[in-house]
Amino acid sequence: MRIQAAFWTLLVGSIGAGAYPPPSPLSASPSPSSSPPAQQSDCNIPSLPPSDPSSIYDTPPGCWHSPANRACWDNGHNIWTDFEDLKEVPKGVVRKYELIITNGEIAPDGYTVSKMLVNGQYPGPKLEGNWGDTFEVTVKNRLSNGNGTSIHFHGIHQLGTNRMDGASGITQCPIPVGKSMTYKWRANQYGTSWYHSHFSLQYTDGVVGPIVIHGPSSANYDEEYTLMLTDWFHTPAFTLYYNEVRGIPPLPDSKLLNGKWRFPCNSTDPRCVSKKGGLSDIVFRRGRRYRLRLINTSTTYMQTFWIDGHTFWVAAADFVPIEPYKTDVINVAIGQRYDIVVEADANTSEQTDFWINMKACLIPPGTSPVDCTAEDARTGIVRYNASSTEDPPTVSNCRDQKMCRDEPKELVRPIVKRKVPPPPEKMLEGFYISSVSFPNESTPYEEADQYRWNMANATFAVEWTHPTYSYLGLEGERQPFPPSYQSIYLNEKDKWVYFVINANYTEASQGKRTVPLDHPIHLHGHDFAVLAQVTHEQFNKATPVKYDLDNPMRRDTAVLPGGGFLVIAFQTNNPGAWLLHCHLAFHSSTGFAVQFIERESEILEQFSGRQVKLYHEQCERWRSDWKTNPAREGIRDSGA
Ligand SMILES: *[C@@H]1O[C@H](CO)[C@@H](O)[C@H](O)[C@H]1NC(C)=O
Ligand SMILES: *[C@@H]1O[C@H](CO)[C@@H](O)[C@H](O)[C@H]1NC(C)=O
Ligand SMILES: *[C@@H]1O[C@H](CO)[C@@H](O)[C@H](O)[C@H]1NC(C)=O
Ligand SMILES: *[C@@H]1O[C@H](CO)[C@@H](O)[C@H](O)[C@H]1NC(C)=O
Ligand SMILES: *[C@@H]1O[C@H](CO)[C@@H](O)[C@H](O)[C@H]1NC(C)=O
Ligand SMILES: *[C@@H]1O[C@H](CO)[C@@H](O)[C@H](O)[C@H]1NC(C)=O
Ligand SMILES: *[C@@H]1O[C@H](CO)[C@@H](O)[C@H](O)[C@H]1NC(C)=O
Ligand SMILES: *[C@@H]1O[C@H](CO)[C@@H](O)[C@H](O)[C@H]1NC(C)=O
Ligand SMILES: [Cu+2]
């Protein structure tokens, strides 16, 4: 077991098995391999019945985190703590990481491709720490292709640290080649996420890695693994971008589970090196419970995930712990995360190896539900026999008919409860998503030879040489934003704001089309509440919508159903410039985004004099490099 886990770590580089304890109050070591804390006090929580890891109990103060008491953390902090209030969050330690971005050739599925790597690997190293810790991540750009870079920590609230959000053209100029930047932020949340480049399409080309922040859990478990699910392209994303622009959405060639798969390539192709491909496997011991941290880092596809012969509890959606619910199959949209707890209780009388399945679903309404016996779904293996190397036999018990949609929001109930006041009759803003002729809508859609996406009134695009902060006056006078910055002002403090995002609307222009595709909508700086998520109807002020206001699903990424609409709400409790965008990478790079300017007067106050200087120096350097960058010419993307 131990040997297997170590082998796995070597092989995959992004997985952790075993409990990761909170630092004991006496331990100064920030090392992720710090030894377990002394279990300080007896916990008076009744022990859980073995069959039900979902029951959690009221936690007395002084209770410590342990496999039987995952709802606890340390003296005074537990799963009921409101982590959106920094004062409530444990103190934590500082954890330092260095991420070096380079070009490189890899063959994770047995097919050699040119990618951009983090510390020479794909996926990049795991950023790991505890709830309340401060992460200090130094990013060095050592790329040889002239690309800038920036790193976004997906789902991290960045309370009071908007400038660490890593959005190129919004909160910073890109990090120029040869330069570095240090991101520093506090983990007020806990759970599972990922970091990725926010410089054009760079994350699709490899610049991603997992983030694991240990904290309480709403379901008990013994050990854990991190599973990164992704689709995978063999052509550089910067090339595929042109297909998207020409109206031919790029489709992935392959997929990876923790950076591995067996792509069936043609051995006469010199790039085909099948022996470098393989399947990721994880080892289960009967009777134990495993927390699997599922992260969907896809570019194009939503993924349906299941494990043959197993059911599981869903314990967190994105960074939000939820009342656990039981299922045997789950859909994970791009950018979403689910923490699930799997009971290792499969019937092993006939087989000891079981397929981990991952099946892409792209969701034009009417697409048939997932076929659970699909051979191409087999992506990895759960083994009860660590020395087995066999492929499992063909069995599948996932519930057929799983539709390719977000998980039903009724099932996703946050532990820290919030009531949302009903939206005012006049919604603050409605967004009408459309695919539009480029360069302008006066060309009829059918006759256009280029297309972009609109989320609000325009196709989103920022200039890397002139980020949002520069317009806000960080480098001189406050200037009005160009229309393509799609800036929406939210100036009132701690107010609930509401947005309707329409996928389907009455076409108003010959150069616009609704395209019935699902879009994973991601907001920076906040978890939003999902008040409505409607699949087959148009939003219409005259028709009442039933809003979910009593502790609705809260998260940072939710699917906008292709033929319908999404109503979201959040509180203006975090001053900053925050993107709202589609996480389908080709959509955001063709303009599917807006930005909120939240409490403008407080944004630049977050900078110290030295930080202003660093921002300015990085921008000056970027501007001067950019003058001679060949990527200036040709078809440009949104930048974010
Ligand atoms: C980034 O690098 C890719 C090649 O990997 C290139 O095609 C693209 O033009 C570069 N973009 C920028 C903005 O430098
Ligand atoms: C593999 O590639 C070769 C050369 O391009 C081609 O002749 C052959 O038909 C291919 N084989 C398969 C199975 O596609
Ligand atoms: C990941 O997200 C993409 C896009 O939403 C989706 O197609 C894919 O099925 C998701 N993967 C999983 C394992 O849910
Ligand atoms: C396990 O599977 C075998 C063979 O299918 C069956 O005979 C047995 O009853 C099963 N055991 C349980 C506990 O379901
Ligand atoms: C485990 O797998 C190994 C290698 O396939 C095999 O020799 C051994 O018998 C298996 N053990 C059990 C208990 O099935
Ligand atoms: C639309 O774009 C075409 C081609 O660039 C240009 O000739 C025309 O003036 C534009 N129309 C408007 C209304 O901007
Ligand atoms: C879109 O246009 C409407 C009407 O001109 C305006 O009220 C709204 O603020 C604009 N939205 C954005 C994001 O620019
Ligand atoms: C959009 O909504 C209308 C009803 O308002 C409906 O007839 C139409 O089928 C919808 N389109 C899509 C693509 O769902
Ligand atoms: Cu999209």
Image: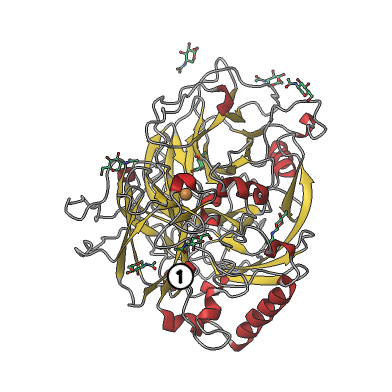
The location of residue 626, given as percent across then percent down, is 71, 71
Residue at (26% x, 51% y) in the render: 539
Crowd class of label 1 (few under 14; some 14 to 19; many from 20; radius 10 Å): few
In the rendered image, residue 299, in percent from the top left (x then y), is placed at 56, 46
Q: Could you tell me if residue 421 is visible in this image?
A: yes
Tell me the quadrant of the picture where the C terminus can be found: bottom right
110 shown above or below 336:
above
Task: Give me the residue at 56% from left, 74% from top.
Answer: 467
Left/right placement of residue 439 relative to residue 518 reads: right
Looking at the image, is 270 positioned above or below residue 638? above
Three-letter residue code for mark 1: Pro
Position of residue 476 relative to residue 371, above or below, is below
Q: Residue at x 43, y 42 (%)?
A: 517
- Is residue 547 found left or right of 625 in the rendered image? left
In front of the other: 560 or 207: 560
Q: Position of residue 269 (x, y in %)?
A: 80, 30
Which scheme is used to colour this image of the protein? secondary structure
The residue tagged 1 is 483
Viewer-side residue, 496 vs 361: 361
Quadrant of the rendered image containing residue 282:
top right
Quarter of the picture containing the N terminus is top right
Residue 220 seen: no
Q: Nearer the viewer, residue 114 or 516?
A: 516
Q: How many marks?
A: 1
Is ligand 7 less than 8 Å from the beta carbon at label 1?
yes
Where disc 1 sits, the SS reads: helix
Instruction: Pinpoint residue 81: horizontal percent, then vertical percent.
Output: 39, 63
